[in-house]
Image (tube, rainbow, N blue to C red):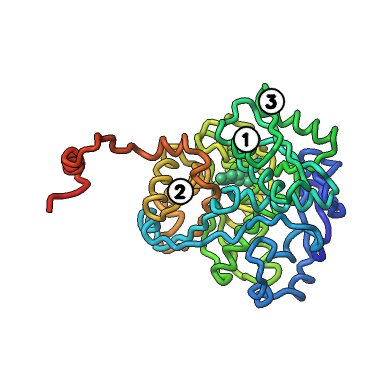
Amino acid sequence: MDYVSHLSCINCEKTYPAEPDRYLCPDCGEEGLLEVEYDYQKIASSWSKAELAAEKDRRIWRYGPLLPVESSTRRPPLRVGDTPLYQSPDLARELGLENIWLKDDGLNPTGSLKDRASAIAVVKALEAGARVVACSSTGNAASSLAGNAASLGGLLETVIFVPERAPGGKLVQLLIYGATVVSVQGTYEETYFLSRDAINKWGWYNRNAGINPYQVEGKKTSVLEMAEQLDFNLPDWLVFSVGDGCTIAGAWKALQDLREIGFIDRVPRLLGVQAEGCAPITEAFYSGEELKVTEENTVADSIAVGNPRNYKKAIRGIKRSQGEMVNVSDEETYEMMRLLGRTAGIFGEPAGVAGLAGIKKMVDRKEIGSRDEVGFVVTGNGLKDIDNARQAAGRVIEIEPDLELLTQTFAKKGIIKDE
Ligand SMILES: *Cc1c(COP(=O)(O)O)cnc(C)c1O
Ligand SMILES: [Zn+2]
């Protein structure tokens, strides 16, 4: 943490030393999200693109000067980050664009972008001297925390709180990573409160991204990486699916970091995409009013956050980038799952591809120009949620083991034309 100067409250601007277990501004409570502040001048004068290029570690740790961790703390050995960036002309054409860049963050070790935040969380937990890390979640935050903690081989235990309605598939990943999984008989809100009380009672490290200021710093590495992969010429737009708001807030933080240290001079516009059935941040973005808690009616479960705790950072970042927000239906998301798979060979979970539907909408409305360059991060792997994918995927051909029958069926379906 040679370059972290302090934490500052986004509500009252009071500052605090960057202790590993400092979560919220005590004066402002839940409103008092903290922001990690860096000494950009010091970074700019002691770090260069050439030095970054020479760094052999391909993982997120290569951005060390812009990360809030001590250089001496152990890192989880997993390969977090270093995900591929593809150009997809066929997908671009289908969306009405000339070019799109796809970053496949579903290829992180536990299958989502959340690994970037959880890797930081376990390092901060070690710095705080914790033996246990905890969060309440049913999805990717939880599994990435369990996986990253497990990779340290017994240094840290993980306790995860899930509401009883949590889908079985997501629980399995947690159990395989050896987490203690507590299924709470109650609503998600009650689950969250029980986790909070338990964390306070036993002094565990708290990974809840809504209040832990270091999580945004991990999430920002997807954009740091994309910038480096594009030789610091970022596209005109960067697009993210938005749930709690932490990921897109991280994107803005990365852009600010890169500009302040002189690695980029032009900043892309951010497009945040929510599901129609759960869009409290879009609502607050356009109304300018306080956020209203909504229901969570969408198949894109990783962005189904009715009471997002990071929305202020998200809205501020999108506004500062001259960005926009838009909502998409579940049907549009399913269509994008098929399109992404068919044209780019990438299988994303619903929340991981919802943003593509937002791009299509913005191109149709001519708010994104057909010649604009667009970058999109696929945030989660489709194999995590097979039940939903099945809804999007269509049907197999069922047939008896008979070549004649197969020939007829193919002919009927137009799969193989007569020679
Ligand atoms: C968490 C998540 C998001 C959204 O990130 P937020 O920080 O909650 O806005 C998008 N896609 C996937 C797959 C996620 O797991
Ligand atoms: Zn404050």
Query: Closer to the N terminus: mark 3 or mark 2?
Result: 3
Q: Label 1 sits on what residue type?
A: Thr
Between 293 and 286, the one lying in front of the other is 293
Q: Ligand 1 closer than 8 Å to the CB at disc 1?
A: no
Q: Residue at x 38, y 49 (%)?
A: 339
How many residues crowd around disc 3 within 10 Å: few (fewer than 14), some, or many (20 or more)? some
Q: Residue at x 57, y 42 (%)?
A: 282
Residue 242 visible? The answer is no
Q: Residue at x 77, y 38 (%)?
A: 30
Task: Work out which quarter of the rendered image holds the N terminus and state it.
Answer: bottom right
Residue furthest bottom in the image? 50
Identify the residue position indicated by label 1 in the image. Answer: 138
Identify the residue position indicated by label 3 in the image. Answer: 184
How many residues crowd around disc 2 within 10 Å: few (fewer than 14), some, or many (20 or more)? many
Identify the residue position indicated by label 2 in the image. Answer: 347
Residue 234 visible? The answer is yes
The quarter holding residue 91 reads bottom left
Q: Is 129 situated above or below 230?
A: above
Task: Work out which quarter of the rendered image holds the C terminus and state it.
Answer: bottom left
